[in-house]
Amino acid sequence: MDEGRGDHLEAVDLMIGRLAPVVRALGGALIVTADHGNADEMFEWDKKAKAVARDASGRPRPKTSHTLNPVPCYLEAPGAELRLATAAEPFGIGSIAATTLHLLGFEAPEGYLPSLLASTECAVDDDERLEYAAAPRP
């Protein structure tokens, strides 16, 4: 594994490990995803040579474009009864905004891609949302 990539992935793991217990304790929701980065494919591939492409000095040529590989999305909301929606087209990163609004108890504005969640009901009622908004922050 490329050391730089490994360091970055370990940092993400560390932060999720710190955030998840707090989110659970507060009864919140945690969404973990990414855009189409290239941690899964760090270097250009030479299809003819069937090997990593190299620059003029022989070093591996970095891949600077996004890959087309699927990106996982993890949603944890302890205590919430959530069901994934079904859609005519596959969901993508564009559905995260509507899903986040759904979890916060808001409807997505017109023009947003659909939520990943099946229910159109708010995840929290207005009183709970107001109590949370008024709660002191650590």
Image: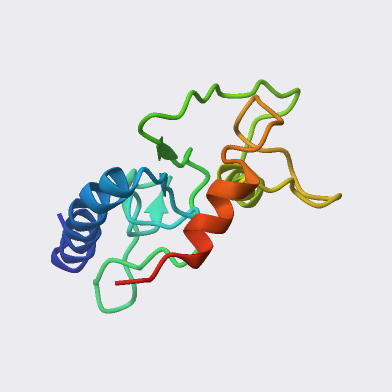
Above/below status of 67 relative to 84: below
On screen, residue 132 versus residue 108, left or right, reads left
From where the camera sits, is residue 44 visible?
yes
116 or 90, nearer to the observer: 116
Residue at the image position 35 percent from the left and 47 percent from the top: 49
Quarter in which the C terminus is drawn: bottom left
Among the 4 quarters of the image, the one containing residue 62: bottom left
Q: Residue furthest right?
A: 110
Among the 4 quarters of the image, the one containing residue 6: bottom left
Residue at the image position 74 percent from the left and 45 percent from the top: 107
Above/below status of 81 relative to 22: above
From where the camera sits, is residue 104 visible?
no
Q: Residue 99's x, y, as percent?
A: 60, 43
Q: Residue furthest bottom?
A: 57
Q: Residue 33's x, y, as percent?
A: 43, 48
Q: Residue 26's x, y, as percent?
A: 32, 49
Residue at the image position 39 percent from the left and 52 percent from the top: 45
